[in-house]
Image: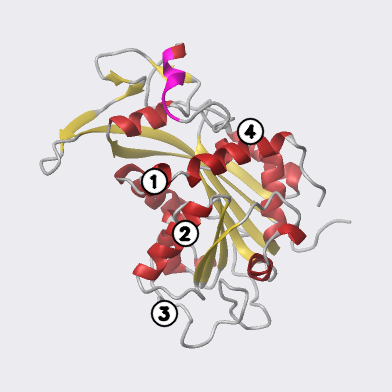
């Protein structure tokens, strides 16, 4: 794999600085982000495709999050059956790329064998592993590593190299692509981490689709003063299905789809509205229900804190693709 262009480092370094800030990292697990992670994981687990089948095991041995064989004691105890979960996941080993604090990882874990979370932010991964330990989850079935997978493998720490070496049955990425300058490079990175026949799933903001906000207008400069700073969100508003399909196809994936669009309903506070506003180039039609350029569908006051919460809707896009069982030369 060739090294990425220098331009990709700009957003990566800005995002690392942003999410290494304890203020941002420790407030990441808010009501809205927890619900977003739950719904995203639900749609990934329920995804269906004729080619989405369980892969043969690693010579019949389940491999843990540390890259070592799972023992009977450390093996995932959950055999949770759910008719809305594709059978593909039952014994899957999964990579959570740009995992943050592990919200999606924790929602996937009851249905799989093991998961590895990787994020560029050291602070986010610290929280990822703290949450795991606080819940008594074995590090052999869930482990987070701080690493920049855009860098050559020899630059990774030995623990990261061991964890990624066996390859993954699936790689997932939730709400991170819009933070990445070169999404084609990100798709190639996901491709490189998979076993032959493995699948990648990317969930992100849907652009260019009928939305829940009504007519859209150009954003005023005031809108750009809130949320993430310049450069942290290079793809404001997310992606069209065609953009993610093209990115996956360029990376070498087959059986590519990006037609799954779904809406997530979230409750958030004023600060959350400002953060969300910073992810969009275009705003909602001005109306009596608009706040910080985000349309609000309902309000409520938290009786214990007195904080006003707002109900919003975010349109999401799920892209999926498979690494060929036999790669073309």
The spot of residue 8 in percent (x, y) is 69, 37
Q: Which residue is mark 3?
A: 77
According to the image, label 1 marks what residue? 28
Which mark lies nearer to you, 4 or 1?
1
Spatial separation of the CA atoms under disc 1 and disc 2: 13 Å
SS of the residue at dot 3? Answer: loop
Residue at x-position 70% and y-position 40%: 184
Look at the numbered discs 1 and 2 and tell me whether their residues touch, using CB distance below 8 Å: no
Q: Which residue was labeled with disc 4?
A: 242
**Which type of secondary structure does the marked residue at label 2 adopt?**
helix
Image height of 47 relative to 165, above or below: above
Residue 294 visible within the image: yes
Secondary structure category for the residue under label 1: loop
Circle 3: is it few (<14), some (14-19), or many (20+) Cα within 10 Å? few
Disc nearest the viewer among 2 and 4: 2
Q: Main secondary structure of the magenta part?
A: helix
Farthest residue to the left: give it: 303
Which residues lie in the magenta part? 222-227
Which is in the foreground here, disc 3 or disc 4? 3
Sequence-wise, which precedes: disc 1 or disc 2? 1
Q: Quadrant of residue 59?
A: bottom right
Inspect the magenta stretch and tell me whether residue 302 lies in it. Answer: no
Q: Nearer the viewer, residue 50 or 220?
A: 220
What residue do we see at 21% from left, 29% from top? Answer: 298
Q: Secondary structure at mark 4?
A: helix
Say if mark 1 contacts mark 3, CB within 8 Å.
Answer: no
Quick check: marks 3 and 4 in contact, CB under 8 Å? no
The answer to whether residue 307 is left or right of residue 255 is left
Q: CA distance from mark 3 to mark 2?
A: 24 Å
Q: CA distance from mark 1 to mark 3?
A: 28 Å
């Amino acid at each position: 794999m060739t090294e990425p262009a220098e331009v990709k480092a700009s957003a990566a370094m800005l995002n690392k600085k942003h999410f290494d800030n304890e203020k941002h990292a420790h407030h990441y697990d808010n009501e809205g982000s927890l619900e977003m992670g739950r719904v995203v994981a639900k749609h990934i687990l329920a995804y269906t495709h004729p080619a989405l089948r369980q892969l043969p095991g690693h010579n019949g041995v389940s491999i843990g999050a540390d890259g070592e064989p799972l023992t009977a004691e450390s093996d995932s105890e959950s055999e949770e059956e759910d008719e809305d979960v594709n059978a593909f996941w039952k014994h899957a080993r999964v990579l959570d790329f740009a995992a943050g604090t592990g919200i999606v990882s924790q929602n996937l874990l009851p249905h799989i064998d093991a998961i590895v979370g990787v994020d560029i932010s050291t602070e986010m991964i610290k929280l990822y592993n703290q949450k795991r330990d606080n819940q008594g989850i074995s590090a052999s079935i869930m482990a987070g590593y701080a690493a920049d997978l855009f860098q050559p493998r020899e630059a990774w720490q030995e623990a990261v190299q061991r964890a990624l070496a066996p390859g993954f049955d699936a790689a997932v990425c939730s709400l991170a692509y819009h933070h990445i300058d070169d999404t084609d490079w990100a798709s190639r990175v996901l491709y490189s981490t998979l076993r032959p026949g493995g699948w990648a799933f990317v969930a992100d903001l849907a652009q260019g689709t009928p939305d829940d906000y009504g007519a859209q207008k150009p954003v005023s400069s005031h809108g750009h003063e809130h949320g993430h700073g310049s450069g942290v969100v290079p793809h404001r508003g997310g992606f069209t299905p065609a953009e993610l399909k093209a990115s996956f196809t360029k990376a070498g994936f087959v059986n590519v789809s990006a037609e799954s669009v779904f809406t997530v309903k979230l409750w958030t506070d004023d600060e959350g509205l400002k953060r969300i506003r910073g992810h969009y180039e275009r705003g909602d039609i001005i109306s009596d229900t608009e706040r910080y350029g985000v349309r609000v569908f309902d309000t409520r006051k938290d009786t214990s804190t007195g904080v006003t919460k707002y109900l919003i809707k975010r349109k999401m896009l799920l892209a999926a693709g498979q690494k060929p069982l036999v790669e073309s030369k």
